[in-house]
């Protein structure tokens, strides 16, 4: 068995996962607001002791995989993650502290990379060597496979497509830049687009509020989804031009909006593909169940590391 842990801004998810992707036990703990990472890790450790009959050490756990924003596979660190108080303004040796507290050294990668490894090991990309997974939720992330290997870059942080500039001098981004595609194509990006489009916007806080308005025929809501989908489609066509993938998988909370988002995305994607790519790169919905993507992705990272003998 492998433990998969997804560290999020508000909650962290923990699961015990077998080689076929079955989650035998899982738990959710609130991510503490504290700046001390040890508090979260102790919370996770306590939760794991409850999940694993016989305790962490005697249950044959072979690896621990962690998906977290701005996590480096090479360094085992989480650095400058705007949504995590303990790593907001610094680089934190998450793997080192985890080892100290639990006796197990985890492997880390960012959440979108974990989703891509999950798609490769448990999802629709098992036969593919070149593909991308795009996660559209709180942020816009990507995991990119090239020739059967995840693209890590020199520092383990490659694939941050959400922070490529879509609109020069555009909306301010949490990363400190302006006009990043993530500020347009994400949960908050959609909400801001809706507010911009509406002359007298009703109170909306989340994409689901806008989805409900769209379902009753609200034109501004439908347009907000359409514009967001088109921006996503154009962006994916850019990615296709650079990486020439066999397929692009889309995951994340925003895909629950279904055709409101996906139909305009597909149209804009097709319209902006280069001629030699037209009709050859399918946009597919991730085959991992939305609620499980994060845990399965992190667990897949654990299984992947076992296969590569990186666990010592
Ligand atoms: Zn940014």
Image (cartoon, grey):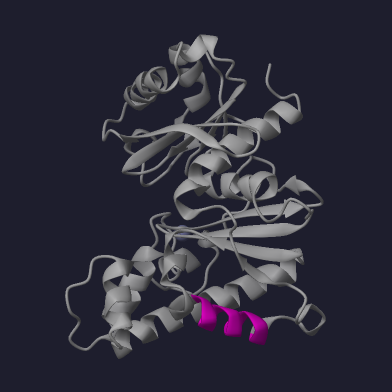
Please state the horizontal and vertical placement of residue 262, each as a whole percent of the image.
Answer: 52, 76
Residues rendered magenta in the picture = 262-271
Residue at x-position 20% and y-position 81% = 201
Which quadrant of the structure image shows residue 216?
Answer: bottom left
Q: Is residue 104 above or below residue 279?
A: above
Q: Quadrant of the N terminus?
A: top right
Residue at x-position 35% and y-position 33% = 86
Residue at x-position 45% and y-position 19% = 52
**Left-right relation of 80 to 234:** left
| Nearest to the observer: residue 102 or residue 94 | 102
**Left-right relation of 60 to 33:** right
Asked whether residue 154 appears in the rendered view, the answer is: yes
**Left-right relation of 63 to 140:** right
Please state the horizontal and vertical placement of residue 4, each as a whole percent of the image.
Answer: 52, 33
Residue at x-position 30% and y-position 88% = 217
Q: Is residue 148 above or below residue 104?
A: below
């Amino acid at each position: 068995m492998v433990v998969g842990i997804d560290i999020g801004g508000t909650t962290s998810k923990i699961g015990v996962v077998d080689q076929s992707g079955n989650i035998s036990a899982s738990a959710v703990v609130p991510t503490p607001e504290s700046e001390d990472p040890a508090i979260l890790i102790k919370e996770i450790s306590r939760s794991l002791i409850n999940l694993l009959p016989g305790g962490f050490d005697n249950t044959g756990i072979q690896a621990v995989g962690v998906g977290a924003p701005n996590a480096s596979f090479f360094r085992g660190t989480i650095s400058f993650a705007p949504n995590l108080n303990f790593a907001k303004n610094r680089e934190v040796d998450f793997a080192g502290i985890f080892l100290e507290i639990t006796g197990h050294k985890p492997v880390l990668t960012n959440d979108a990379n974990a989703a891509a490894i999950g798609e490769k090991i448990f999802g629709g990309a098992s036969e593919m060597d070149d593909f991308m997974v795009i996660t559209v939720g709180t942020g816009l992330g990507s995991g990119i496979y090239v020739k059967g290997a995840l693209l890590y870059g020199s520092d383990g942080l490659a694939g941050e497509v959400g922070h490529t500039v879509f609109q020069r001098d555009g909306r301010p981004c949490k990363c400190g830049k302006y006009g990043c595609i993530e500020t347009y194509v994400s949960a908050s990006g959609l909400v801001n687009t809706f507010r911009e489009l509406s002359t007298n916007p009703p109170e909306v806080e989340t994409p689901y509020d806008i989805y409900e308005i769209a379902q009753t025929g609200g034109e501004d809501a439908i347009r907000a989804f359409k514009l967001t989908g088109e921006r996503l489609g154009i962006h994916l066509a850019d990615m296709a031009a650079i990486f020439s993938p066999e397929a692009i998988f889309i995951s994340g909370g925003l895909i629950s909006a279904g055709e409101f988002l996906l139909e305009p995305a597909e149209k804009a994607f097709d319209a902006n593909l280069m001629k030699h790519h037209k009709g050859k790169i399918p946009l597919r919905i991730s085959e991992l169940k939305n609620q499980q993507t994060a845990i399965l992705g992190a667990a897949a990272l654990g299984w992947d590391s076992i296969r590569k003998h990186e666990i010592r």
